[in-house]
Image (cartoon, rainbow, N blue to C red):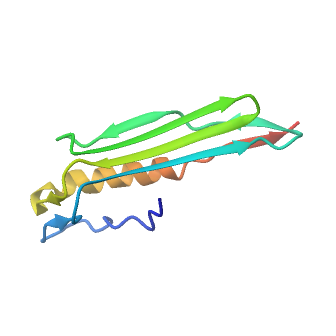
Amino acid sequence: MTMGPNPFLSENRVSDIDFGYRDNYSVNGIYKIPDGYKIDALPKSVTIVMPDQSIIFKRTVAEDNGTIVIRYMLDHKKSLYFSEDYPDIRDFYKKMYELLNEQVVLKKI
């Protein structure tokens, strides 16, 4: 899933948002913890939902026997959003990008 930069940074919007179609993105990653390192900080698993429940973002993070398993899921349940919905979309995407930028921190042992 290539998200690119957040497209909803502007304070105001005068036109509707048309994603073109409903979509569901899912990205899964399994990362081996290098020898000599341990996890110092791991992002928490979290779900955020638009007030009208039309967009859901879910991040699942777990440690499993020397590996870190991360899954991101973004589900757009509708494709068209009206300009008056923009503040909710802007807030949702701001929070989602903050969550996408949280880092796993490893510590040398």
**What count of labels does the image hold?**
0
Q: Is residue 10 above or below residue 78?
A: below
Which residue is rendered at x = 60% and y = 46% of the image?
29
The spot of residue 55 in percent (x, y) is 27, 46
Determine whether, in the image, residue 33 is placed left or right of residue 3: right
Quarter of the rendering occupied by the C terminus: top right
Which residue is rendered at x = 57% and y = 38% of the image?
43
Q: Is residue 39 above or below residue 92?
A: above
The spot of residue 90 in percent (x, y) is 27, 57
Determine whether, in the image, residue 64 is placed left or right of residue 48: right
| Quadrant of the image occupied by residue 93 | bottom left
Which residue is rendered at x = 18% and y = 52% of the image?
78
Q: Is residue 96 above or below residue 17?
A: above
Q: Is residue 26 above or below residue 86?
A: above
Which residue is rendered at x = 21% and y = 40% of the image?
53
The spot of residue 17 in percent (x, y) is 18, 65
The furthest residue to the bottom: 15
Question: As rendered, which of 61 and 104 lies closer to the eye?
Answer: 61
Determine whether, in the image, residue 105 is placed left or right of residue 26: right
Question: As rendered, which of 98 and 18 lies closer to the eye?
Answer: 18
